[in-house]
Image (cartoon, rainbow, N blue to C red):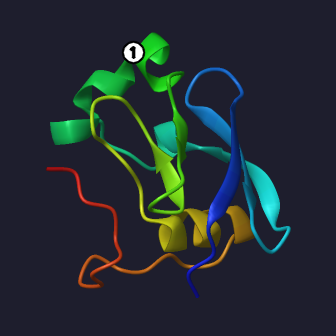
């Protein structure tokens, strides 16, 4: 399914607006989806989370801390369909 993220806008808190290369777009709240452990721990602070940016080489979003999220998972979340499961290699890791 791999669709690249082409736009990301921080919308306050842990909410992001995302637009994908096929025109799919929407807002997601990552406070409901991440446990903010491991590489994501520093993103609990809104100031750090707000530093989100496109990672064009990977077609996804990332942060200066090195954390990023799989674009397939983000796409599923925006579309409101089941994301790849924990046994799926595309599931987000929190290590």
* In front of the other: 88 or 55: 55
Question: Which residue corresponds to mark 1?
Answer: 45
Q: Residue at x 81, y 67 (%)?
A: 24
Q: Residue at x 52, y 66 (%)?
A: 71
One can see residue 37 in this view = no
93 up-or-down from 37: above or below: below
* Residue 3 found in image quarter: bottom right
Q: Residue at x 56, y 62 (%)?
A: 74
Q: Position of residue 56 (x, y in %)?
A: 54, 54
Q: Position of residue 84 (x, y in %)?
A: 42, 80
Q: Is residue 88 left or right of residue 15?
A: left
Q: Quadrant of the N terminus?
A: bottom right
* Residue 64 found in image quarter: top left
Q: Residue at x 56, y 81 (%)?
A: 2
63 up-or-down from 89: above or below: above
* In front of the other: 79 or 39: 39
Q: Secondary structure at mark 1?
A: loop
Q: Position of residue 85 (x, y in %)?
A: 36, 80
């Amino acid at each position: 399914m791999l669709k690249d993220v082409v736009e990301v806008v921080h919308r306050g808190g842990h909410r992001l607006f995302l637009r994908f290369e096929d025109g799919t777009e929407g807002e997601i709240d990552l406070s409901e989806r991440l446990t903010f452990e491991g590489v994501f721990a520093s993103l609990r602070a809104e100031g750090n989370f707000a530093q989100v940016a496109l990672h064009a080489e990977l077609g996804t979003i990332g942060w200066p801390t090195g954390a990023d999220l799989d674009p397939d998972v983000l796409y599923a979340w925006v579309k409101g369909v089941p994301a790849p499961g924990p046994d799926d290699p595309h599931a987000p890791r929190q290590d």
